[in-house]
């Protein structure tokens, strides 16, 4: 189905990437802030994930070194995050 197409093993199957997207939806915009908030690797590792998410259209730069989830992706992402956490 559509959900399985959206959750690709390469892009959204990674729990760090889901955490990044959840944090960006919550207002965290920079890689430095993501690295500090998530404690899930170095800034370089976070940049790698952000670049992958950007390449797949899940993140977009909206100012210098600031990212957000593009509006058309917010609802699908919320559905994915809800499914990934079992609805919690």
Image (cartoon, rainbow, N blue to C red):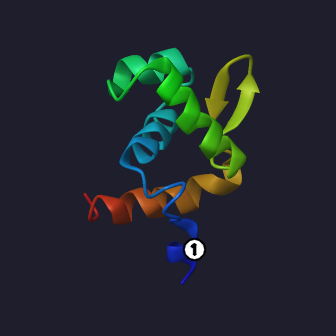
Q: Name the residue under label 1.
A: 5
The residue lying toward the viewer, choosing from 74 and 32, is 32
Q: Quadrant of the C terminus?
A: bottom left
Position of residue 19 measured from the top left corner of the image (x, y, whole percent) = 40, 41
Q: Is residue 15 left or right of residue 56?
A: left
Q: In this view, does 50 lie to the left or right of 45?
A: right
Question: Is disc 1 surrounded by few (<14), some (14 to 19) or many (20+) residues within 10 Å?
Answer: few
The image quarter in which residue 39 lies: top left
For numbered disc 1, what is the local secondary structure? helix
When the figure is inspected, residue 25 is found, relative to residue 78, above or below; the finding is: above
The residue lying toward the viewer, choosing from 19 and 43, is 43
Position of residue 40 measured from the top left corner of the image (x, y, whole percent) = 34, 29
| Residue shown at the point (57%, 78%) measured from the top left | 2
| Residue shown at the point (72%, 30%) measured from the top left | 61
| Residue shown at the point (54%, 54%) measured from the top left | 11
Position of residue 77 measured from the top left corner of the image (x, y, whole percent) = 52, 56
Q: In which quarter of the image is the N terminus?
A: bottom right
Position of residue 73 measured from the top left corner of the image (x, y, whole percent) = 64, 55
Residue projecting furthest to the bottom? 1
| Residue shown at the point (38%, 26%) measured from the top left | 41
When the figure is inspected, residue 6 is found, relative to residue 74, above or below; the finding is: below
When the figure is inspected, residue 24 is found, relative to residue 18, above or below; the finding is: above
Residue 88 can be seen in this image: yes
Residue 69 can be seen in this image: no
């Amino acid at each position: 189905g559509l959900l399985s197409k959206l959750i690709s093993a390469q892009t959204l199957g990674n729990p760090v990437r889901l955490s990044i997207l959840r944090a960006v939806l919550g207002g965290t915009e920079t890689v430095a802030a993501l690295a500090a908030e998530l404690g899930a690797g170095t800034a370089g590792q976070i940049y790698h994930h952000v670049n992958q998410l950007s390449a797949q259209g899940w993140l977009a730069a909206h100012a210098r070194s600031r990212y957000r989830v593009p509006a058309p992706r917010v609802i699908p992402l919320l559905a994915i995050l809800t499914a990934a956490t079992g609805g919690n």
